Image (cartoon, helix red, strand yellow):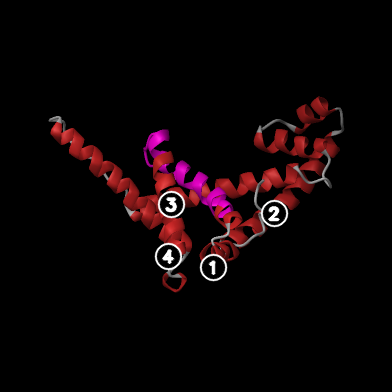
């Protein structure tokens, strides 16, 4: 079962650090693991390596929260996670470098700096928030399926309003109204999720 999108990062941390709450851990993991994997891929890691780095990072986050290594007064959770991830990526390259040198192969690899990891994370976090918001809207019983579909066809798939109207059997005006209605709700949902995720 997916966690509540409105749960703040602070609430997840409190649940994790104070009681070892399994739901809090699952929520934190569901929130950040996909961003870590996608960021790793952007930094040139293979899918398997990106998954491994994300796994190791999230395990260190869990251990750090439970043993008190993370001090919220010294910085944001995001910064701490990025630092852990960067060290995991560096460790991965070092292990590979040792194997390459032993095999007589050049082991020169450019390691990611903090700025490049931050840039990748920010882009992936924005994409993740948009996906979460769209998923929430798709399950919103107050929005008709055709309304969501009209929006997605026009905005996400770049179809013209006339083409969408013909496909859905509605008027062009209906398509524009659907786009406006969903856009308004999507912006509100994105703001809600961003507020929750940045509350740490």
Res 67 label:
4
Q: CA distance from mark 1 to mark 2?
A: 29 Å
Residue sitting nearer the eye, 74 or 181: 74
Work out whether mark 1 precedes mark 3 in sequence or the reverse, and give the earlier one.
Answer: 1
Q: Quadrant of residue 25?
A: bottom right
SS type, badge 1: helix
**Outermost bottom residue:** 73
Q: Is residue 114 above or below residue 124?
A: below
Q: Which residue is mark 1?
A: 18
Work out whether mark 2 precedes mark 4 in sequence or the reverse, and give the earlier one.
Answer: 4
Work out whether mark 1 precedes mark 2 in sequence or the reverse, and give the earlier one.
Answer: 1
Whether residue 36 appears in magenta in the rendering, the answer is yes
Res 189 label:
2
Residue at 86 percent across and 27 percent down: it is 169
* Label 3, residues with CA under 10 Å away: few <14, some 14-19, many ≥20: few
Residue at 43 percent across and 58 percent down: it is 63
Q: CA distance from mark 3 to mark 4?
A: 12 Å
């Amino acid at each position: 079962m997916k966690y509540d999108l409105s749960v703040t990062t602070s609430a997840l941390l409190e649940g994790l650090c104070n009681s070892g709450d399994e739901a809090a851990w699952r929520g934190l993991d569901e929130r950040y693991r996909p961003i870590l994997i996608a960021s790793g891929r952007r930094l040139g890691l293979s899918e398997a390596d990106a998954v491994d780095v994300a796994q190791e990072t999230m395990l260190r986050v869990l251990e750090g929260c439970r043993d008190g290594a993370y001090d919220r007064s010294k910085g944001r959770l995001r910064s701490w996670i990025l630092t852990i991830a960067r060290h995991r990526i560096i460790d991965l390259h070092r292990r590979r470098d040792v194997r390459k040198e032993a095999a007589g192969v050049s082991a020169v690899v450019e390691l990611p700096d903090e700025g490049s990891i931050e840039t990748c994370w920010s882009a992936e976090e924005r994409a993740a928030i948009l996906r979460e918001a769209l998923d929430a809207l798709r399950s919103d019983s107050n929005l008709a399926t055709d309304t969501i579909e009209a929006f997605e066809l026009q905005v996400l798939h770049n179809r013209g309003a006339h083409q969408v109207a013909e496909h859905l059997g509605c008027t062009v005006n209906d398509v524009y109204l659907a786009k406006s209605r969903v856009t308004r709700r999507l912006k509100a949902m994105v703001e809600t999720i961003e507020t929750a995720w940045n509350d740490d």
